[in-house]
Image (cartoon, grey):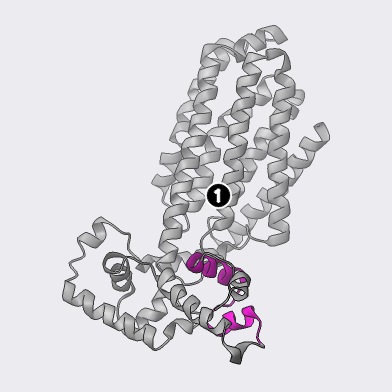
Amino acid sequence: MHYFLVAGLSQGLLLSILLIYKSASKRNNAWLIGMFVLLITAVISGPMLNEWLGEPLGSLLVDPLILLIGPSFYLYIRSFTHHLKGGDYLLHTLVFLLYLPVLAVFYTQQVSGATSPASLQAVYSSGFSVAIGLFKFLHLFFYVHLSFMALRRHRAKVERAFADLMGKDLAWLNYMLGAFIFLVAISLLLYVAALRHPDYQHQLTLLNLGMLSVFILTISFYAFHQHTLFDYAGSRAAAESLEAVVEDGPKYEKSGMRPEEAAEISAKIEAFIAAKGYLNPNLTLGSMAEDIGVFPHKISEVLSKYRDTSFYDLINRHRVEDIKQAIHDPARSHLTILSIAFDFGYNSKSTFNAAFKKFTGMTPSAFKSAKP
């Protein structure tokens, strides 16, 4: 297990250093995900620090860093659609800063005199230690919730601006966050088990840290083979084009758009569709707005408020309808489904498959096998 932890620790350090270095060279906020990886790596290092510095000093050094794991991940997501300021960092590190003096007092009054295993166990299982431990789990779950909400809002906003979501909807962050919340939940169960069975606390702690090592090793493998974590610039460029898209709700209610203006814009949208402008594989809300002479945020408002749809659904629904006819067209029988999809505005297989299944409820191959 020791060598396994060392592997996770070394990979985590390497990945976090690369992310922070690339962030500094490209002047973006990718350093935040680097900090997320580095903070988890620091937690993994706890047992080794205890061996070098003496228990529980090593654990106490990394203990407060847990309160920065959630904020670093959430702020990374938020950085795609918001320009982070000093106040954002201060607000989300406030709990960490307030916890430091509390930990210092706890150490001087409770921990510093505990040297034997029995006295250390008494400290770990004290009411204050348990309350702090549970609070840190609540803190992590709170930021997991904030991160999921931020990703959901980001995806909804992307759908109002793009016909192709690949590389723009941050789906890989959803997978990472899903895996992380699973680990947090397992860690909580192991923490409770260690409290109920103190004789197995060391083994349960190593098991928990081993799972975190698997998480770090998986992220490292995915990053170095898929380069997703390093593709911040492309995702950020896409996110910046969302600035012209306003949020739903109160902003639309206060926009002052008259029904006559909405009807005029809707007619222009219909004319664009009739001219098959949706076949442009590089189509975005911005390029469509330029073609029909309407501000992007007004198109977004008409689609959302008056037509109950998004830009993504509008474009892909028409593309899919055309492709459904083309698949059973004898004149195209010599073409593959993917070739047909490329003729109707798609430029990737995964994007086409996702859109086709959304609007038909079946895969393209299943649809082709069905009778027309």
Q: Is residue 92 above or below residue 169?
A: above
Q: Is residue 152 above or below residue 162?
A: above
From the viewer's perspective, tell me whether residue 195 is left or right of residue 273. right
Quarter of the rendering occupied by the C terminus:
bottom right
Q: Which residues are magenta?
A: 335-360
Quarter of the rendering occupied by the N terminus:
top right
Quarter of the image where one finds residue 367 = bottom right
How crowded is the residue under tag 1: few (<14 C-alpha within 10 Å), some, or many (20+)? many
Q: Nearer the viewer, residue 50 or 276?
A: 276
Quarter of the image where one finds residue 182 = top right
Mark 1, residue position: 32
Residue 24 visible in the displayed image: yes
Q: Could you tell me which secondary element the residue under label 1 belongs to? A: helix
Pinpoint residue 110: horizontal percent, then vertical percent. Answer: 57, 11
From the viewer's perspective, tell me whether residue 260 is left or right of residue 66. left
Residue 281 visible in the displayed image: no
Report the residue at 51% width, 15% height from top: 128
Q: Residue furthest front?
A: 371
Quarter of the image where one finds residue 307 = bottom left
Report the residue at 68% width, 50% height from top: 219
Pinpoint residue 8: horizontal percent, then vertical percent. Answer: 74, 41
Pinpoint residue 191: horizontal percent, then vertical percent. Answer: 62, 23
Residue 342 magenta-highlighted: yes
Q: Main secondary structure of the magenta part?
A: helix
From the viewer's perspective, tell me whether residue 152 is left or right of residue 301. right
